[in-house]
């Protein structure tokens, strides 16, 4: 089963409510929200208030990706503002296990994120604790980048570990995802596709979702 999570980073911010409605109407499964602080990554994006407003107008689960330094200071507030899933970077803290527990204590599903340069084996001791692993397939911070093929090594590792240890976490991929790259990610073991530019630049968004799910 493939799940689709359009990323609002690529949406038209002047028509955000219409864009969110189109995500719902397309048959997508999640709404992906990238939170950037201009420090952990060189860009700024959405905040608590934006998430709270979005939560009022959608019934889709909101998948929040925290690209923040010191994420422990923000998890509770994002949970209170409407996040259903919160994912944090293993590179953002030496206390990743504590962060995962903090997310769960806030009532959210817990995810952990890998940048392209971080080997998946860094997560070995926490994979039994998470609901989702997000592999960045571009360097985080900006949309519209090209897919990094070497990240498939991590996806394959995560899929094999999941099978060997009888775990149930989702394997999500984000960055440069289109019909072609989605196919190789699915073959490697991914089952959640974050589609930003591919989704929001399409004239037939329901068709894009259908094609991605059919892979």
Image (cartoon, rainbow, N blue to C red):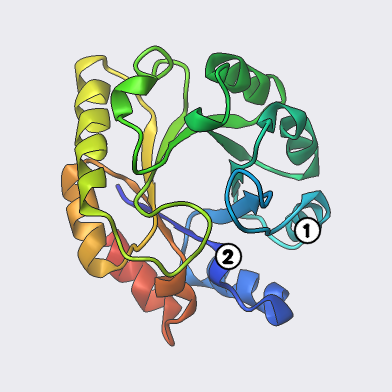
Q: Check disc 1 and report its element: helix, strand or loop.
A: helix
- Identity of the residue drawn at 35% across and 73% down: 208
Left or right: residue 165 versus residue 6 is left
Residue, far bottom: 203
Residue 161 point in image, percent of width and height = 24, 22
Residue 215 can be seen in this image: no
Residue 108 makes an appearance in the image? yes
Q: Residues within 10 Å of mark 2 (few under 14, many from 20)?
A: many
Of 214 and 69, which appears nearest the observer?
69
| Residue drawn where x is 44% and y is 77% of the image | 205
* Residue at image coords 38%, 68%: 209
From the viewer's perspective, tell me whether residue 209 is left or right of residue 113. Answer: left
**Residue 11 percent coordinates (x, y):** 59, 73
Q: Nearer the viewer, residue 22 or 122?
A: 122
Which quadrant of the rendered structure holds the C terminus?
bottom left
Name the residue that disc number 2 marks.
9
Query: Marks 1/2: CA distance?
Result: 12 Å
- Mark 1 lies on residue: 50
Q: Residues within 10 Å of mark 1 (few under 14, many from 20)?
A: few
Near-viewer residue (58 or 31): 31
Sequence-wise, the earlier of marks 1 and 2 is: 2
Q: In which quarter of the view is residue 66 placed?
A: top right
- Tell me if residue 69 comes above or below residue 99 in the rendering: below
> Which picture quadrant has residue 12?
bottom right
Locate residue 160, reporting x and y percent. Answer: 19, 26
What label sits on residue 213 in the rendered view? none
């Amino acid at each position: 089963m493939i799940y689709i999570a359009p990323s609002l980073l690529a949406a038209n911010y002047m028509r955000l409510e219409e864009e969110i409605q189109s995500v719902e109407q397309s048959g997508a499964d999640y709404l992906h929200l990238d939170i950037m602080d201009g420090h952990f990554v060189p860009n700024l994006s959405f905040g608590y208030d934006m998430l709270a407003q979005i939560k009022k107008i959608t019934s889709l689960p909101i998948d929040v990706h925290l690209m923040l330094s010191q994420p422990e200071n923000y998890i509770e507030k994002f949970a209170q503002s409407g996040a259903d899933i919160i994912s944090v970077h293993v590179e953002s803290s030496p206390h990743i296990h504590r962060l995962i527990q903090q997310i769960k204590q806030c009532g959210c599903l817990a995810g952990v994120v890998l940048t392209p340069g971080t080997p998946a084996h860094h997560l070995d001791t926490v994979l039994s604790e998470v609901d989702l692993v997000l592999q960045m397939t571009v360097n985080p911070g900006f949309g519209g980048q090209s897919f990094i093929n070497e990240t498939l090594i991590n996806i394959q590792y995560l899929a094999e570990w999941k099978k060997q240890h009888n775990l149930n976490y989702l394997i999500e991929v984000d960055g440069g995802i289109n019909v072609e790259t989605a196919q190789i990610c699915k073959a490697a073991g991914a089952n959640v596709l974050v589609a930003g530019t591919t989704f929001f630049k399409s004239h037939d968004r329901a068709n894009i979702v259908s094609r991605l799910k059919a892979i």
